[in-house]
Image (cartoon, helix red, strand yellow):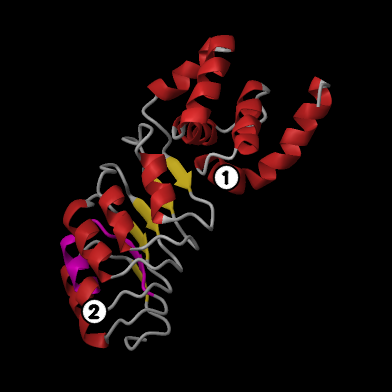
């Protein structure tokens, strides 16, 4: 669309589907990359965390990096976005995979990331290798993913600042859940619809002094 006003209105309507658009851009779809660049250029997105997420997505592919670089030549101020240490909040689209997460996190600065939602994505325990590289993470939502015991054991060893963890409808069992006893800062834990036993639950309550809320509905501990 050649008309700037119409183009902006179109992009504003597209911003409601920002997640799928970023996922397509990660998978190097030219139309999605162009749309994200246009959203930055026309200031369709106001939230700074979302802008940083778009920038990182663009930086994740050769085509996106090239188009973002050209955009920066036209709008120097956008470069400042990358100097802020990255976003504090990040939500991946529902069909994201381990590969999508790895690609995104490897091409940007996420040292400040505190809140990450992978709910209803296709990530597995393999993503734990990427998650342990997020030193500031305090909130992690893995609801309805295939994240299992191996991944849980790994993040329990590294993400000691984690305060909120959602494992609802994941395939975790007592084998992985017992490792959560090392995460002394956990305040909220959702184990709804997992293979949690009453014995393991009692152990978690005993060894997690900061735990304030724990959802154990539809488990053997309920």
Residue at the image position 81 percent from the left and 27 percent from the top: 1
Residue carrying label 1: 24
Residue at the image position 48 percent from the left and 60 percent from the top: 121
Residue at the image position 73 percent from the left and 36 percent from the top: 12
Q: Is residue 204 above or below residue 17?
A: below
Q: Judge from the rendering whether residue 183 lies leftward or rightward of residue 103; answer left or right.
A: left
Q: Is residue 152 above or below residue 60?
A: below
Q: Which mark is residue 174?
A: 2
Q: Residue 81 location, x and y as percent? A: 46, 23
The C terminus appears in which quarter of the rendering? bottom left
Determine whether the residue tagged by mark 2 lies in a helix, strand or loop: helix
Q: Which residues are magenta?
A: 177-191
Mark 1 surroundings: few (<14), some (14-19) or many (≥20) residues within 10 A: some
Q: Residue 154 location, x and y as percent? A: 20, 59
The reply to whether the magenta stretch includes residue 83 is no
Residue at the image position 58 percent from the left and 47 percent from the top: 19
Frontmost residue, 56 versus 198: 56
Frontmost residue, 24 versus 50: 24
Q: Residue 37 location, x and y as percent? A: 60, 27
Determine whether the residue tagged by mark 1 lies in a helix, strand or loop: helix
Frontmost residue, 102 versus 62: 62
Q: Judge from the rendering whether residue 7 lies leftward or rightward of residue 105; answer left or right.
A: right
Mark 2 surroundings: few (<14), some (14-19) or many (≥20) residues within 10 A: some
- Determine the residue located farthest toward the bottom in the rendered image: 220
Q: Residue 62 location, x and y as percent? A: 46, 29
Does residue 11 appear in the picture of this structure?
A: yes
Q: CA distance from mark 1 to mark 2?
A: 37 Å
Earlier along the polypeptide chain: callout 1 or callout 2?
1
Q: Which mark is residue 170?
A: none
């Amino acid at each position: 669309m050649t008309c700037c006003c119409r183009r902006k209105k179109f992009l504003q309507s597209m911003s409601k589907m920002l997640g799928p658009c970023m996922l397509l851009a990660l998978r190097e779809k030219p139309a999605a990359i162009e749309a994200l660049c246009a959203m930055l250029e026309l200031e369709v997105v106001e939230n700074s965390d979302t802008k940083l997420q778009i920038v990182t997505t663009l930086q994740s592919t050769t085509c996106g990096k090239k188009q973002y670089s050209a955009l920066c030549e036209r709008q120097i101020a956008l470069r400042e976005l990358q100097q802020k240490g990255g976003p504090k909040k990040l939500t991946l689209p529902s069909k994201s995979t381990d590969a999508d997460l790895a690609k995104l996190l490897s091409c940007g600065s996420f040292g400040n990331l505190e809140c990450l939602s992978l709910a209803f994505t296709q990530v597995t325990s393999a993503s734990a290798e990427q998650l342990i590289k997020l030193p500031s993470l305090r909130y992690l939502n893995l609801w309805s993913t295939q994240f299992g015991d191996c991944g849980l054991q790994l993040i329990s060893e590294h993400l000691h600042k984690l305060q909120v963890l959602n494992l609802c409808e994941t395939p975790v069992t007592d084998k992985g859940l017992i490792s959560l006893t090392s995460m002394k800062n956990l305040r909220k834990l959702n184990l709804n619809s997992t293979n949690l036993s009453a014995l393991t639950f009692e152990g978690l309550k005993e060894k997690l002094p900061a735990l304030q809320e724990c959802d154990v509905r539809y488990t053997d501990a309920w």
